[in-house]
Image: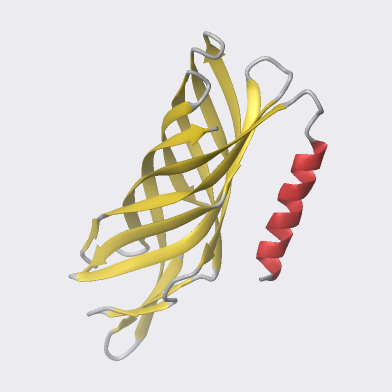
Amino acid sequence: MKKILTVVVLFAALMTAVPAKAEVKFGLKGGLNLTSMSLDANAISKSNQAGFFIGPTVKFTLPIVGLGFDASALYDQRKAEVDDTSIKQQSIQIPINLRYGIGLGSTASIYFFAGPQFGFNVGDKDIKTDVGNWTFKSSNISANVGLGLMLLGHLQVFANYNFGLGKSGELTENTVPNQIKENGKLNAWQIGVAYFF
C-alpha cells in the first residue's frame, strides 16, 4: 500500500510540473500480452501464453516539437505454463513512458517510447505446480521499449516489449533431498490500441 501511495504522489507531482502550454488528453488503452517466462534453470518445461491489459491512460504533449509522455493504470493478466500447470499473474501496472513522435501533425505520426513500469500484484500470490510452488512478488519494476502509430489525434496503435528489471517471482522445487529455489521473470511482447477523447 505504501508503494502504491508513493507512485500516486509521484504521478501527481509529474502532472503539476507539466508546463501550462502542454496538451493533455485522456483515454482508454487495451491490448494483448504474449508472455515469455524465463527461469534460472532449463530443466523445467515451460511455454508461453497470451493475456491482456486494459485501463485508463493520459497523454501529455509538451511544447517541444514531438516530445511528450504518457501514463496509464492498467489491469494486467499474464499466463505461462510450467510442466502442464498454468501460472497466472493478475496485477495493476503503471507504465510511465517518454515519447517522441515524428509525422504529419495531427493527421498521422509515428512515435517511439520507453520508460519504467511499476506493478502491484492483485491476484493469487502462491500457486502450486507439479514441480513445486510458485510465489509472486507483491510488487515489481519492469521497462517498456516500443513504437506506435497515432492517427487523427485520437487513435493509437502500438507494439512494445516489456521486460522485468528484477524477478517476478520464485519457484521452489520439491526435489529430494533438497529444495531448489529458482528466480523467474514474466516478460511480454505487447500489442494494443488506445483511444484519446
Q: Would residue 92 be found to the left or right of residue 63 on screen?
A: left
**Residue placed at 53% from the left, 32% from the top?**
196
The residue at the far front in this view is 197
Q: Is the C terminus in the top left, top right, bottom left or bottom right quadrant?
A: top right
**Residue placed at 36% from the left, 58% from the top?**
78
The residue at the far bottom in this view is 177
- Residue 88: name its quadrant: bottom left
The image shows residue 21 at horizontal and vertical percentages of: 78, 23
The residue at the far top in this view is 104
Towards the viewer: 109 or 36? 109
Q: Would you place residue 83 above or below residue 37 in this image? A: below
Towards the viewer: 28 or 192? 28
The image shows residue 32 at horizontal and vertical percentages of: 34, 46
The image shows residue 163 at horizontal and vertical percentages of: 46, 48
Towards the viewer: 5 or 48? 5
Towards the viewer: 157 or 46? 157
Instruction: Report the coloring of the rendering.
Output: secondary structure
Is any atom of residue 167 visible in this view?
A: no
The image shows residue 121 at horizontal and vertical percentages of: 50, 67
Q: Would residue 3 be found to the left or right of residue 39 on screen?
A: right
